[in-house]
Image (spheres, rainbow, N blue to C red):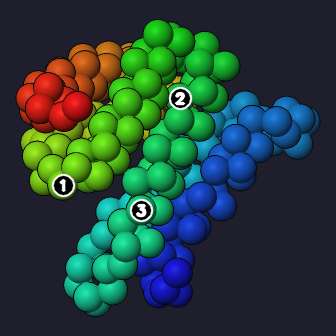
Amino acid sequence: MPLNLPNVLTWLRIVLIPMFVGIFYFETTWVSIPNQNLLATVIFTTAAVTDWLDGWLARRLNQMSAFGAFLDPVADKLMVAAALIVLVQLERVDAIIALIIIGREIAISALREWMAQIGEARSVAVSFLGKIKTASQMLAIPLLLYHDSIGAFSPQRVGTWLIYLAALLTLASMAYYLKVALPQAWKRP
């Protein structure tokens, strides 16, 4: 495993996960619920920014590695899954929405692994639809974590609409990836 700045940032995202979840286990006499929401939002947003930053730095500094390419999506999926599970527990997201998003991530990761094994990895590269889905969920999650109104603005309402959009895009992008992969499945014994 090469120890470079992009990989360190990816490891940082993984280390942030227990901190992120742990925020909600503090006694409210130590950290009030609004402050728990704020801290969780800051931690998640920091992880989202480092996700973008580690990829940019890896390309910019020419520090791309096979290990980094493996670990980066794992860190992303773990953080999103942790956030969705917390949001379900806090009753801010329906369990079915979390199941759709997490289930799709697992299924598409497995599909990409299989396609890579048969030499067809490029055919299931990240699509534009997948990028829109990711943007929608990465905007929705911090809004749902923050939860409290900001004047007339309701992060919960906007976050709920965005997470529903992310779930719909999740299903659409999964259908797209399956459509691309199924011909390969029929060719293989």
The structure residue drawn at horizontal position 52% and vertical position 81%, both measured from the top left corner, is 1
Going from N to C along the chain, the mark reached first, 2 or 1, is: 2
Callout 2 touching callout 1 (CB < 8 Å): no
Which residue is nearer to you in this view: 176 or 26? 176
Which residue is nearer to you in this view: 50 or 117? 117
- Residue 173: image x %, image y %? 19, 28
C-alpha gap between disc 2 and disc 1:
33 Å
Could you tell me which secondary element the residue under label 1 belongs to? loop
> Where is mark 3, residue-wise?
70
The residue type indicated by label 1 comes to Gly
> Where is mark 1, residue-wise?
119
- Horizontal relation, residue 29 to residue 39: left or right: right
Kindly tell me whether residue 139 is visible in this rendering: no
Could you tell me which secondary element the residue under label 3 belongs to? helix
- Residue 146: image x %, image y %? 53, 34
Which residue is nearer to you in this view: 153 or 116? 116
In front: label 1 or label 3: 1
In which image quadrant can residue 16 be found? bottom right
- Residue 131: image x %, image y %? 19, 43
Determine crowd level at label 1: few under 14, some 14-19, many 20+ residues with C-alpha closer than 10 A.
few
Q: Is residue 125 above or below residue 159?
A: below
Determine crowd level at label 3: few under 14, some 14-19, many 20+ residues with C-alpha closer than 10 A.
few
Q: Which mark is residue 38?
A: none
> Where is mark 2, residue-wise?
84
- Residue 85: image x %, image y %? 60, 27
Determine crowd level at label 2: few under 14, some 14-19, many 20+ residues with C-alpha closer than 10 A.
many
The structure residue drawn at horizontal position 72% and vertical position 31%, both measured from the top left corner, is 33
